[in-house]
Amino acid sequence: MTIIIIILKFLSIVLGSIIAGFIGSLTGLGGGTVLVPVLTLFYGIPFIFAAGASLISTIATSAGSASAYTKKKIANIRIGIGLEIATTTGAIVGSLTLVTIDKNHLIFVVYILFGVILLLSLIPTIKKIGAEIPPETKPDWTTKLFQLTDSYYDERLKQRVKYHGIRWWLGEIVMFFAGFVSGLLGIGSGALKVLGMDWAMNLPMKVTTTSSNFMIGITAATGSSIYWYEGYINLFIAAATAIGVLIGAYLGAKVLVKISNENIRWVFFAILSFLGFDMVFKGFHLINFIITFSLTMQFFISIAISIVMIGLLYWHTKRKVFADKQGDKK
Amino acid sequence: MKNHDDEVIISYFLKAGVIISVSFLVTGVLIMFLKNGGDGVTLSQLSSYNYAYHHHIDSARISLSNIPNGLTSLDGLYFITVGLWVLIFTPITVVFIGWVSFLEDKNYLYVAMASIVLFNLFFAMLVIPRYVV
């Protein structure tokens, strides 16, 4: 009888991971950003195990969907490997920081940080909603030196899009933090990688999300090996999440090339804001800080806050787009 | 990259890595359920997260040098271990392929950069577990 319960437990983790992997792949986030909150908040798994299972599964998402993207030649492997210098270094520092935090029993800090970083990663996303191809910029000295010029074929626009990256050094700085966050929180930190390439280096959104997806695997591999020796990986959970996330990522990759970027951004904005608020509450809950709602209460408060926030922002953006169109007519 | 087949090769490597990894994972999971656990731990101990957390039933107690023994004795946990390590090595092969193709292109700046990435990866894998943590 117990074995049936355990099998169901296993399958339920697989199911949660499929959903996380699907969203992760669709957004270029890499699954972990959704998986860690899901495992800790809904399955009651200790943060350390959630982070361990998530980070190693992130490699599966990354590899699974990157194999589809690289073949289509959208992802830029050269730029990706160049930026990996910073992400792998960051991942080493980040994982060692998590080890220190865990040894000092300060894991609530990680929950709050997780939520805050989740919510912060939404800001650059909202700001650029609707921009498929980045604004024209002049190449700078790093464009030539680090060979940041390339092109890809956009299936939706039905044309070859030429692009060039700028401010390589700024990209590297953002990538260090992306790697740090990846090692610290057990996620792919795709949002920060997207920020590094989209905002800092002014690369097109398609190139950014696909290249980040491919880079996530390398960053996660660095953190995972440190996690392994630290004992952060529970084989029962990790096997379930790796399989589930992979299935989800496969489905997500099938969909990604077909949908518009604007939709991608709204989907990840909606889900992440809820998970972000809930993680912050959970962190405060752990130390009984000011508010000690029950976990169910937290859940509904988080939903309410995110619905209001997304609603307002969606309305705001739509109104701006409408106003811009009116302005064009005049 | 001048040689445009590299992207196709990388794509195959990623796919192969994932397929090998998943085959080991699925086999491991099936054996784990059939044998009610593995490596001296029962299934219910493994799946009670808090019990496992407090009794250190995790990756740290699995010694990689036991893998050959674990596989030949059909221990599910060691199959899962192999599956997860194949997963870790999959993206590393991609950096390695990139390194080779940069070398072919005589793109020495990127050869150097890919070398740093590989160094970081092996530093995390071999040096830190032994000397730092």
Image: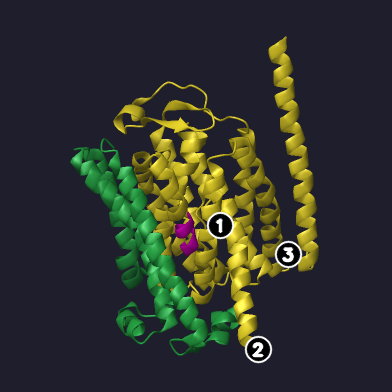
Same subunit, labels 2 and 1: the answer reads yes
Q: Nearer the viewer, mark 3 or mark 2?
A: 2
Label 3, label 2: how far apart the Cα atoms are: 41 Å
Q: Helix or strand or loop: what does disc 2 sit on?
A: loop
User: Is A8 on the left-hand or right-hand side of B28?
Assistant: right
Task: Confirm whether the magenta stretch covers residue A57.
Answer: yes
Disc sitting over residue A112 in the figure: none
Expressed as whole percent of the image width and height from the top left, the position of residue A135 reads: 52, 24
What is the magenta range? A56-61
Mark sitting earlier along the chain (3/2):
2
Quarter of the picture holding the N terminus of chain B = top left
Chain B palette colour: green
Residue in the picture at 62% in, 41% down:
A265
Between residue A304 and residue A67, name the one nearer to us.
A67
Residue in the picture at 40% in, 79% down:
B78
Between residue B70 and residue B95, name the one nearer to us.
B70
The residue labelled by disc 1 is A248
In the rendered picture of this protein, how many numbered marks are placed on residues?
3
The secondary structure that most of the magenta stretch takes on is helix
Q: Are marks 3 and 2 in contact (CB under 8 Å)?
A: no
Q: Which chain is yellow?
A: A
10 Å neighbourhood of mark 3: few (<14), some, or many (≥20)? Answer: few
Expressed as whole percent of the image width and height from the top left, the position of residue B17 reads: 37, 60
Same subunit, labels 3 and 2: the answer reads yes
Circle 3 marks a residue in which chain? A
Label 3, label 1: how far apart the Cα atoms are: 36 Å
Circle 1 marks a residue in which chain? A
**Residue type indicated by callout 2:** Met
Q: Quadrant of residue B2?
A: top left
The residue labelled by disc 2 is A1
The residue labelled by disc 3 is A289
Residue in the picture at 53% in, 54% down:
A249
